[in-house]
Image (cartoon, coloured by chain):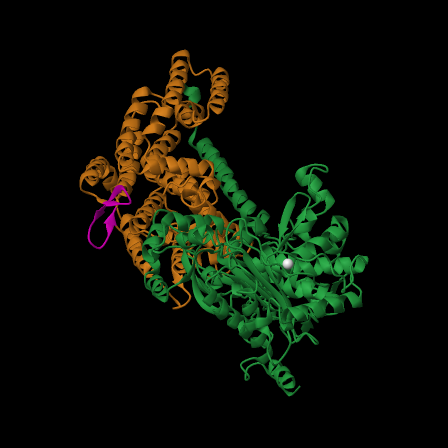
Amino acid sequence: MTVDYKSLDWKFVLATAGLSLIGILLIYSAHYDSSTGSSLNFYMRQSIWLLLAIILFNAVIHIPVRVIDFIAYPLYGLALLLLALVLVAGETRMGASRWFSLGFMSVSPSDIAKLALIVALSRFFAYTKLPPQSKRRLAFSAMLAFIPALLVMKQPDLGSSLVFVVLLFSLWFWSGLSPAYLILIISPLVSLVAAFHWVTWVIYLVLLIIFMLVLKPGILFGVIVFISNLAFGMITPFIWNHLEDYQKLRVITFLDPGRDPQRAGYQIIQSKIAIGSGGIIGKGYLEGSQSQLKFLPERHTDFVFSVLGEEFGFVGTLTVVLLFGFIFYRGIRIASRCRSKFTSNLVWGALTIIFFQFFVNVGMTFGLMPVTGLPLPFLSYGGTSLLLNWTLIGIIVLADYHRSEY
Amino acid sequence: MSAYFIEKDRRARLASVLLVIALMTIISGLFYHQIIRYKSFLAQSEENRIRIRPIIPKRGVIFDRNKEMIADNRLSFTVSIVPMEMAKEVTLPRLAGLTGADTSAIKQKLNANFISKYIPAAVLRDQDISVISALEENSEHFPGVTYSVESVRRYVEGISAETFIGYIAEVAPDEIDKESQWGYRPGRLIGKKGIEKAYDRELRGIEGTDFIEVSARGQIIGTYGGRERVPAVPGADLVLTIDAALQREIVRFYDSLQSSGGVVALDPTTGEILALASFPGLDPNLFSGVIPDDVWRSIIDDPRHPLLNRPTSSMYPPGSTAKLLTAGAALEKGVLTPETMLRGCGGGMRFGNRVFKCWQEQGHGRLDLYHAVEQSCNVYFYQVGQILGLDAWNEFAVKSGFGRKSGIDISGELSGIAPSRAYYDKAFGQNRWSKLLILNIAIGQGEFIVTPLQLTQFYAGLANGGKVFKPHLLKEIRYPGKAIQKIEPSLSFTLPFANNTISVLSRSLELVVQGDRGTAKGLRNKYYTIAGKTGTAQNPHGKDHSWFVGYAPSNDPKILVCALVENAGHGSEVAAPLAGKIIKRYLLGDSTHNVIAHNVAESLVSE
Ligand SMILES: [Zn+2]
């Protein structure tokens, strides 16, 4: 299919490219060695990945919409197959089987599954005749999301499995489910978290009842919601006991980073120090002591935003946050002006994934969010992440290009 | 149910609002961390990478009076651990394996010397170069382990240096004062005894501070330019009054005796201590490294108490050396004249219903004061004591420096006991003690106990016309930058004796050596005259202790020697010959080394 490049949303693409270039700059700095004046080859590899990602992006925008429509379920099936396979035959790193090794690169099936779930859910919500709050509609879409979520949780990768669930909720919302209804449906999950502290949980349940009394969602539904809340809250201790040690540690560390400054909390503390000590304009490129002297862990992947904060200060972080803001804002506009429900859903799903990763990752660097291992889209080092996110951008640009088609 | 359905535009608007809220949350979080709390995080980031490294100043060197170096410093390797960077369960066992030390011992040291998790805490001192090169080559196997070159004290051996210099060791918990400018921090060295303790502040200097930049793994990146280095001020050098050559000879003489005991030699005209030795002694170099537990225990358990500083911290009855005090007091009180002949000695005398013996069984016959001192007749002095009475005796004993400390400039000194009426009342009950106790005290036995230093002091007064200069070990402090503080002799007290009395006493002391029946006539020689007194301290636990205290030349005293040999019997048999050798060595020297002594010897020969 031929594409008229002039009518593509170039501002959108340039913002993405800008973020990707900033990422390479930061990855270079993260592994810079002042004594030799050079950096480890991560930045070179990331540059090559960026090149590949742009080629992939270019390929994506040439795909006819109906082809995407057509491959939706086969892609979803393939993704499930890969997820199942990686549990058995995947490469194990740091106690988690998340990757397939293809020699030159490691492929993470959960990234493919994210893409597949966007397409599958978009397709389902676009063509189903069931009303938004219909139980069959909710149940089927929930099943589509929870199967990959559970498989990913098994790896174990709590961060990615959350992405699937969030994607489901987000598309429920976008395909017409009322926010109030959505809140009630999500409420048992909140119970799950709130029940760690029983006073909080009780207060939460009271608020929930008041909310339902105002909203009057129907007796049966209300009772189901309330019972689910009770049930989820009560299984919290059970779940807690079945969490992996490192997952428990992450929760504890999130709640109280000062508790163990030498181990898990160390990452958050060092990241906060890096960001905070950057001040308004930062310490200067390649001058951040936290990253240059290796106090900052995972500084080319999960904590690349902290390198930005340290070396470029508030000016730097604000710039990146605003670039993301621009992408999301423009993305919402694209989603809302797409005439086709399917492409609109695609855009919305893609935005959700990018946004969720962005919010959790940036929030994590200064302690707003727990350490989940989700990378910062476009900036963090990682080939598949870059390919996935550029593909999502490609889908958004593609949808925008075809916005007037049904 | 259609109420729950909202239009696409409204959803987009709602989403936009939520997006703005989310972005504002993130931006305000960043604003809070990067702008509001900037200073605090900047300080933390500096603390992260900047290590404060103390610069330990060179400890002052110690010289003897002839500028012979008797304590200096050698370099040694100290292994330390940066608690922040060590790997639990790995670092300590590996370090123990490498050095042959005990894991729990290292852990204990680490806790004891912990200052901050970023500051290296010394765990193993004086390590072999092979240990250091192994650490150097396999540094990644020993996370958190660093080493530093430190100086370690080195003392000249064979001069019983531990007696007066003492030693240094790590600061004990009760000595730690982190705020002190003197650097009494965990893991630092501090003088524990003797000169090292008394003049620790002068010797240690003032610590400096270096600021270095390190990586997360503790690798030193280099000097941190942001804060100015504070240089250390080296410690002052000390010149002691000790004569190391004399000290060395004393150790040689004493070693041949195979006994415990002590020697004090001083210049009676200034109070400068020329020699101070305690036997058996200890090599103070033992304390410089890490003293193994078993060695330490064997020192503590040694029945001969090698750590005891006998000249200042061990008390004995003075024996006959105390007769001069009795005589002096009686002369001053006017109850005795030098010519007074008391009842004759028949080897003993009955007082009350008890016979008090003289040391010479066949007796001394009738004597005057001079000859009673010369022959050290107990019976004569029993009678003097009886005439004098306890109260008068005690008055003169205290005024003569007994029962109180001399104030020597090293710690650990004991004050001895000069018994009084109050003392006996307390010990035996009000008036429930025999009035005859004074008889024993008059001849230096019984409850009267002294340190060799107190006896030295008393005789120094006799040698010096009654003036007693405070005994001291420090002659000069040489501060860095050439400022020299000389320690001037200071008058401690004057003996409560008139000049007449003193000349009678010194003449009688000369007779002890020069008289035909003198108890120390073996010390007579053609070069100089010695004035002195032998003594035998009764020892209920074994053989008597042997004393001699004397000075020479008697007309112009240059040296006073007080020698005590435990369990050696009569003073004339062991202590007197020993003191004689010491005096000879000092005054005549080895004719090349000691110029002053050489001159004295020549002038004596020409007389
Ligand atoms: Zn007699």
x 37%, y 25%: residue: A237
B262 vs A360: above or below:
below
Residue B247 vertical placement versus A356 (above, below): below
Indicate the position of residue B514 as horizontal and vertical percent values: 64, 73
Res. B402 in view:
no
| Residue A56 appears in view | yes
- Is A100 magenta? The answer is yes
State whether residue B552 is above or below residue B182: below
Give ligand 1's quarter of the image: bottom right
> Magenta segment, which residues?
A92-107
Nearer-the-camera pick, B91 or A209: B91
Q: Main secondary structure of the magenta part?
A: strand
Give the x, y percent position of residue B546: 55, 60
Q: Is residue B50 magenta?
A: no
Where the C terminus of chain B falls, by quadrant?
bottom right
**Can you tell which quarter of the image residue B442 is in?**
bottom right
In the picture shown, does residue A243 fall above or below A9? Answer: above
**Looking at the image, which residue sits at the far bottom?**
B606
Q: Which chain is green?
A: B
Task: Note the chain letter of the orange one.
Answer: A
In the image shown, does B152 or B412 lie closer to the viewer?
A: B412
